[in-house]
Image (cartoon, rainbow, N blue to C red):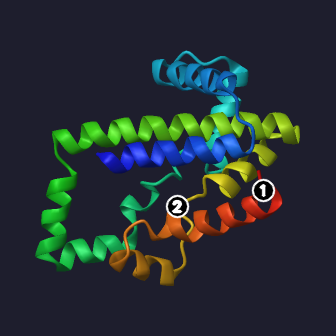
Amino acid sequence: PSHHVFNLIGNVANNAMVGVTPAMYTKAGKILAKAKAGKLSASEEKVMQKAYDYGVLGGGYKADRFDPIRQQRMANSKLARIEDKVQNNRFSNLMNWGGNMGDDLTRMALFLHGTSRAGNMKGGGEMVRKYLYNYGEQTGADKGIKIAMPFWNWTKHNVPRQLLEFMQQPR
């Protein structure tokens, strides 16, 4: 469960680097709540659709859940099947729900912020890929490395991003 908290803190910190305001989190939360309730306006429906199209939603830290390499490991390994049982139970599902909620909120807030800054939703999607990444975009090497090194995708993207931001904005 703690990795969900760390993921949320990291996402908020990365969002703060680019100026996402509390108002954007509020707006994002309202859109996500309305989507869950099935009460989106036509313009909000378009925002949600574009968020999925650009990998803002559905591309966060759990994006590799149905990865073919992972599925092959599941089929060929008793340990992997035990791992799946540990990860797929009521408690884990509740924790994942909380993690997904935080991930979706921070990603949507950045998407709205980026859309506002760029003047279009494509620019908003690109900002999310740049600062919060799309964890579904992995090379074959990434898929192999992450088996031995948990959080590889985050490390691969975030460490260079932090160094670059530090050099560009040394506050």
- Residue 50: in sight, yes or no? no
Q: What residue type is labelled 1?
A: Pro
Label total for image: 2
Q: Which amino acid does label 2 sit on?
A: Tyr
- Residue 5: in sight, yes or no? yes
Contact (CB < 8 A) between labels 2 and 1? no
Where is the N terminus found, in terms of image quarters? top left
**Residue identifier under label 2:** 135
Q: In this view, does 82 lie to the left or right of 39?
A: left
Q: Position of residue 90 (x, y in %)?
A: 17, 39
Residue visible at 46% across and 54% down in the picture: 61
Residue situated furthest front in the rendering: 171
**Residue identifier under label 1:** 170
Quarter residue 101 falls in? top left
Mark 2–mark 1 Cα distance, whole angstroms, equals 28 Å
Residue visible at 57% across and 38% down in the picture: 106
8 vs 94, nearest the viewer: 8
Residue visible at 60% across and 57% down in the picture: 133
* Disc 2, SS: loop
Residue visible at 71% across and 46% down in the picture: 17
Tell me if mark 1 has few (under 14), some (14-19) or many (20+) residues whose alpha carbon lies within 10 angstroms of its own.
Answer: few
Is 22 placed above or below 95 here? Answer: above
Q: Position of residue 97 (x, y in %)?
A: 34, 37
